[in-house]
Image (tube, grey):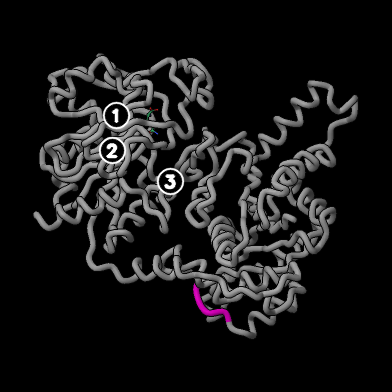
């Protein structure tokens, strides 16, 4: 029997609902239950694929090729359960489905309305999860009170009534702001937020109260009294130093125990939290530190590289070092010399990106890393930039560029119009919708035996997640390999370059995929472990 936990948020956005849901998932797993996490996003985009990382943080790609919200990254990193496209929906998707059915005449002439048609479609999305796990944790994006959230709240209310109290509970995440003049945490916004939720007919059983300092027992009792919630279900969720402490701190405050109590389940097994204890120990007690420069475009919003930052942290955990990140806007290298900003860093990483702003700076960063023998990790766009750099400076192809650039004389990076997915040929063209033309999701690659990359992976067959439109043009392979840049990973049909590396460089690897999406604190990705290890070695050299 699947039980449902709905998680809503109030007072302000960015309270860490996604992280909280993920941490609760991890705690339930530690008690031996299976979990699935899903998310309902009230915005109108059909999926986050076309949203700017500036506004919304990174787009997280699943194995099955769905472009989802960055919270899915938290879900996977905390629970290890691979997310699927069917785990995420949005207002845009729900309306698209309903309107398609309406056009096909599936509603038999009925007048289509938000209630029941939209709310039923939302419930169908939730119901699809039935039987897939002991617990389904379903996060509602946005903040209670937003116009867009209303149909979702109505739908989960109806759903909760239908399955009954012993199969569905509601957790509300709120904020207790500290007002310095009064010298206390304020509970009023939480009271109002709960009142708002109740006006939709939802009474939360558990409140997860975010605060930047200790919440006294008096305050807990007061919130419980005013919000009609048992005091022990008012759970303090204080700020922590590392996100990986969250499962432990929530457990210490009784979150998982109270969740089980709400379902009438006994608290009989002591959860095994040793994995999280070890991770936190390594985060808190590093033996040394390294600095990695991330040369990119969206560097002023940390969330736009969320998975990348986490994967680097995981590489640090595995090597028992603290990884300091130095974000550098690549455009700066178009006017200033790379050494001004890169001197002293232990590794350089050029992450994924789109468009041609700042590309010349990324190419200069790759050149600097190659020439100075600093560990270089090029991810997707970062690999393409390294290839262009080699073409220009090692092969003498001056006009080398990507057909993604506004001006490109010689496309060493270009559009491949077709490629294989399993036995099926997929196609893309430059003129299609932005959402529909990318190579998305997990694809296999074959690694060259004896290459550095095959040693790092410990195998020659891998599968990694992709999200890109352009590919390295294999017409230049021979020239590039002669110059030292080896094509050490290819798609199984040999048509698409997946990985390049220099043999005579301590660590210079470019990958066409996004390894950061699969890294977990308890299962760090081998490429990040190896990159950080190379950065540590580099540190010994300087
Ligand atoms: N813009 C490049 C492409 O579409 C790289 C994409 C990426 O880095 N994710 O191929």
How far apart are the alpha carbons under marks 2 and 1?
8 Å
**Which residue, given by chain and number where applicable, does mark 2 sit on?**
378
Query: In percent of the image, x 13 and y 22: which residue is there?
Result: 482
Q: Name the residue under label 3.
A: 518
SS of the residue under disc 3:
helix
- Few, some or many C-alpha atoms within 10 Å of disc 1 (few <14, some 14-19, many ≥20)? many
Q: Circles 2 and 1: CB distance less than 8 Å?
A: yes
Q: Residues within 10 Å of mark 3 (few under 14, many from 20)?
A: many
> Residue 304's spot in the image, x, y percent?
43, 45
Q: Is disc 2 placed on a helix, strand or loop? A: strand
Q: Badges 1 and 3: C-beta atoms under 8 Å apart? A: no
| Residue 262 image position (x, y, % from top left) | 73, 69
Task: Please tell me the numbered disc located at residue 296.
Answer: none
Q: Can residue 15 be seen?
A: no
Closer to the chain start, of discs 2 and 3, is: 2
Residue 509 placement (x, y as % from top left): 24, 38
Q: Tell us which disc is closer to us: 1 or 3.
A: 3
Q: What stretch is highlighted in magenta?
A: 211-215
489 vs 161: above or below = above
In the picture, the quarter occupied by the N terminus is: bottom right
Q: Quadrant of ligand 1?
A: top left
Q: Residue 106 is drawn in which quadrant?
A: top right
> Percent x, y for residue 177?
56, 70
Residue indicated by mark 1: 384
Above or below, 307 against 521 in this view is: above
């Amino acid at each position: 029997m699947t039980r449902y936990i709905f998680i809503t948020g109030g007072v302000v956005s960015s309270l860490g609902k996604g992280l909280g849901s993920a941490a609760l998932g991890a705690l339930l797993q530690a008690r031996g239950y299976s979990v699935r996490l899903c998310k309902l996003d009230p915005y109108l985009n059909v999926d986050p694929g076309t949203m700017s990382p500036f506004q919304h943080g990174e787009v997280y790609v699943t194995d099955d090729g769905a472009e989802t919200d960055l919270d899915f990254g938290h879900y996977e990193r905390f629970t290890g359960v691979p997310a699927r496209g069917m785990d995420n929906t949005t207002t845009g998707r729900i309306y698209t489905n309903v309107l398609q059915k309406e056009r096909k005449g599936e509603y038999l002439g009925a007048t289509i309305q938000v209630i029941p048609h939209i709310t039923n479609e939302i419930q169908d999305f939730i119901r699809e999860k039935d039987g897939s796990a002991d617990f389904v944790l379903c996060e509602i994006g946005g903040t209670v009170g937003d116009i867009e959230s209303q149909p979702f709240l109505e739908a989960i209310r109806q759903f909760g009534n239908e399955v009954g109290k012993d199969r569905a509970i509601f957790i509300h995440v709120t904020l207790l702001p500290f007002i310095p003049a009064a010298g206390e945490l304020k509970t009023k916004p939480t009271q109002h937020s709960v009142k708002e939720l109740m006006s939709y007919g939802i009474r939360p059983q558990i409140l997860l109260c975010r605060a930047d300092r200790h919440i006294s027992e008096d305050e807990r009792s007061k919130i419980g009294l005013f919000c009609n919630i048992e005091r022990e279900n008012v759970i303090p969720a204080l700020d922590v130093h590392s996100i990986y402490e969250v499962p432990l701190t929530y457990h210490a405050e009784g979150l998982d125990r109270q969740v089980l109590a709400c379902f009438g389940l006994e608290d009989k097994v002591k959860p095994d939290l040793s994995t999280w204890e070890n991770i936190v120990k390594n985060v808190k007690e590093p033996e040394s530190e390294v600095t990695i420069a991330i040369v990119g475009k969206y560097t002023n919003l940390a969330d736009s590289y969320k998975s990348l930052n986490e994967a680097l942290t995981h590489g640090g955990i595995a090597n028992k070092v603290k990884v300091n990140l130095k974000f550098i806007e690549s455009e700066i290298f178009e006017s200033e010399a790379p050494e001004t900003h890169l001197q002293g860093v232990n590794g350089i990483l050029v992450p994924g990106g789109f468009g041609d702003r700042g590309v010349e700076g990324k190419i200069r960063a790759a050149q600097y890393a190659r020439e100075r023998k600093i560990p270089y990790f090029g991810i997707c766009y970062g690999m393409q930039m390294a290839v262009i750099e080699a073409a220009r400076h090692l092969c003498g192809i001056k006009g080398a560029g990507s057909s993604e650039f506004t001006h490109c004389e010689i496309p060493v990076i270009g559009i491949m119009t077709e490629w294989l997915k399993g036995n099926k040929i997929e196609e893309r063209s430059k003129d299609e919708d932005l959402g529909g033309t990318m190579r998305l999701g997990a694809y296999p690659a074959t690694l060259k035996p004896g290459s550095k990359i095959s040693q790092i992976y410990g195998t020659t067959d891998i599968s990694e997640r992709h999200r890109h439109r352009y590919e390295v043009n294999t017409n230049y392979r021979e020239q590039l390999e002669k110059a030292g840049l080896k094509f050490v990973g290819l798609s199984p049909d040999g048509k698409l370059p997946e990985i390049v590396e220099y043999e005579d460089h301590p660590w210079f690897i470019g990958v066409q995929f996004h390894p950061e999406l699969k890294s977990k604190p308890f299962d760090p990705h081998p490429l990040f472990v190896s990159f950080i290890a190379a950065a540590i070695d580099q540190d010994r050299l300087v």
